[in-house]
Image: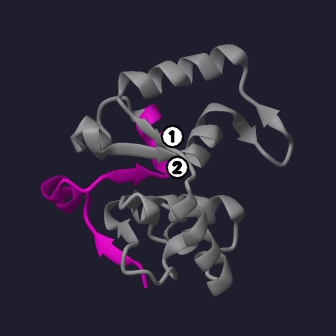
Amino acid sequence: MAQDITLQDCINQRKAVLFDTNILIDFWRDRGTHPFFNVPPELRYISIINRFEFLVKRNFETADIFSHDERKRRERWLNNYSIKTLHLTKNSSIYFGRLFDSKVIIELEDGLIAATAIAENCALATRNFKHYKSIEDKKFFLITDFLEANN
């Protein structure tokens, strides 16, 4: 089972936080009240997969993507809030292979996001707890503050 941690514990321990796309979108919409603002800028991260989902896609099933102007606006916002992007690395590919082999990850994107969090020693903030809760790795931390009632 994933290790549980609170957002405040991450801040106190200076543990980097990787924000899943759903949390990033919440922050984008709240513009000032989201708990994300409590995370020091040097601890704010997204994976390259989250970056793609946030900047480009509206709906994968219909291949609907954001306009050029909307992508630029979102890019400026990421920069303004010092949200750094973590890229896929050799270590993240190794962790992804282990997750895939263990059959706990259902979707490719979720596996790559989880593998990046593990490889980069980040806690993952997500509302999609059910996508990640069965990961058994002592290096994988899920931030519990954002759990939805139906998870």
Q: Which residue is mark 1?
A: 25
Residue 35 occupies quadrant: top left
Q: Residue furthest right?
A: 62
Q: Is residue 86 above or below residue 6?
A: above
Query: Height in image: 90 above or below 52?
Result: below
At label 2, the amino acid type is Asn
Q: Is 88 placed left or right of 80 in the picture?
A: right
Q: Residue at x 63, y 22 (%)?
A: 71
Packing grade of label 1 (10 A; few <14, some 14-19, many >=20) is few
Residue 55, horizontal then vertical, whole percent:
62, 32
Tally of numbered discs: 2
Q: Which residue appears at 37% of the width and 74% of the height?
A: 139
Amino acid carrying label 1: it is: Ile
Residue 22, numbered circle: 2
Which element is circle 2 on? helix
| Residue situated in front as seen by the camera: 32 or 75 | 75
Query: Against 7, is 136 above or below?
Result: below
- The kind of secondary structure element at disc 1 is helix
**Label pair 1/2, CB-CB below 8 angstroms:** yes
**151 in the magenta segment:** no
Q: Position of residue 30 (x, y in %)?
A: 39, 34
Q: Residue furthest left?
A: 12
Q: Left or right: where does residue 58 sit relative to residue 87?
A: right
- Residue 19 versus residue 56 in the image, above or below: below
Q: Residue 9, percent across and down?
A: 18, 62
Can residue 87 be seen by looking at this rendering?
yes
For the magenta stretch, what is the residue range? 1-29
Q: CA distance from mark 1 to mark 2?
A: 5 Å
User: Is 16 inside the magenta-drawn segment?
Assistant: yes
In percent of the image, x 45 and y 63: which residue is there? 119
Identify the coloring.
one colour
Q: Quadrant of residue 5?
A: bottom left
